[in-house]
Amino acid sequence: MDKIRYKCMKCKYAFTRKNDLPVTKCPYCGKESVEEQKGMDASKILDESSY
C-alpha cells in the first residue's frame, strides 16, 4: 500500500501515513499546519534509475 509523506510547517516534523488515513493535524505538536510533500524520496529515485 502506498504512503503519503507529510511535513508540519510549524514544528517541521516529517511523517508518512497510508493513503486511506486522512491527516488534518500534526501528530507531534497538534497544529493544523500539515502539508503533503510532493516529489520523490531517495529510494524511489534509486529504484527508477536502476537498469
Image (cartoon, rainbow, N blue to C red):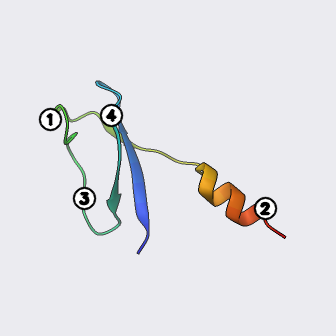
Q: Which residue is mark 4?
A: 13
- Name the disc covering residue 30, or none: 1
The one nearer the camera, 23 or 44, is 44
Q: Amino acid at mark 3?
A: Pro
Circles 3 and 2 in contact, beta carbons < 8 Å: no
Give the secondary structure at mark 2: helix
- Name the image quarter holding residue 7: top left
Q: Amino acid at mark 1?
A: Gly
Please report the residue visible at 32 percent of the width from the left and 34 percent of the height from the top. 13
Give the secondary structure at mark 4: loop
Which of disc 2 and disc 3 is earlier in sequence?
3
Q: Amino acid at mark 2?
A: Ser
User: Mark 4 Cα within 10 Å, few/some/many (few <14, many 20+)?
Assistant: some
User: Mark 1 Cα within 10 Å, few/some/many (few <14, many 20+)?
Assistant: few
Which of disc 2 and disc 1 is earlier in sequence?
1
Residue 35 rendering spot, x and y as whole percentages: 37, 41
Q: Residue furthest top?
A: 10
The label nearer to you, 4 versus 1, is: 4
Q: Which residue is mark 2?
A: 49
- Name the image quarter holding residue 31: top left
Please report the residue visible at 22 percent of the width from the left and 39 percent of the height from the top. 26
Between the C-alphas of marks 4 and 3, the distance is 17 Å
User: Mark 3 Cα within 10 Å, few/some/many (few <14, many 20+)?
Assistant: few
Is the N terminus in the top left, top right, bottom left or bottom right quadrant? bottom left
The label nearer to you, 1 versus 2, is: 2
**29 left or right of 17?**
left
Q: Which residue is mark 3?
A: 22
**35 left or right of 51?**
left
Give the secondary structure at mark 3: loop
Between the C-alphas of marks 4 and 1, the distance is 11 Å
Q: Is residue 2 above or below residue 25?
A: below
The label nearer to you, 1 versus 3, is: 1
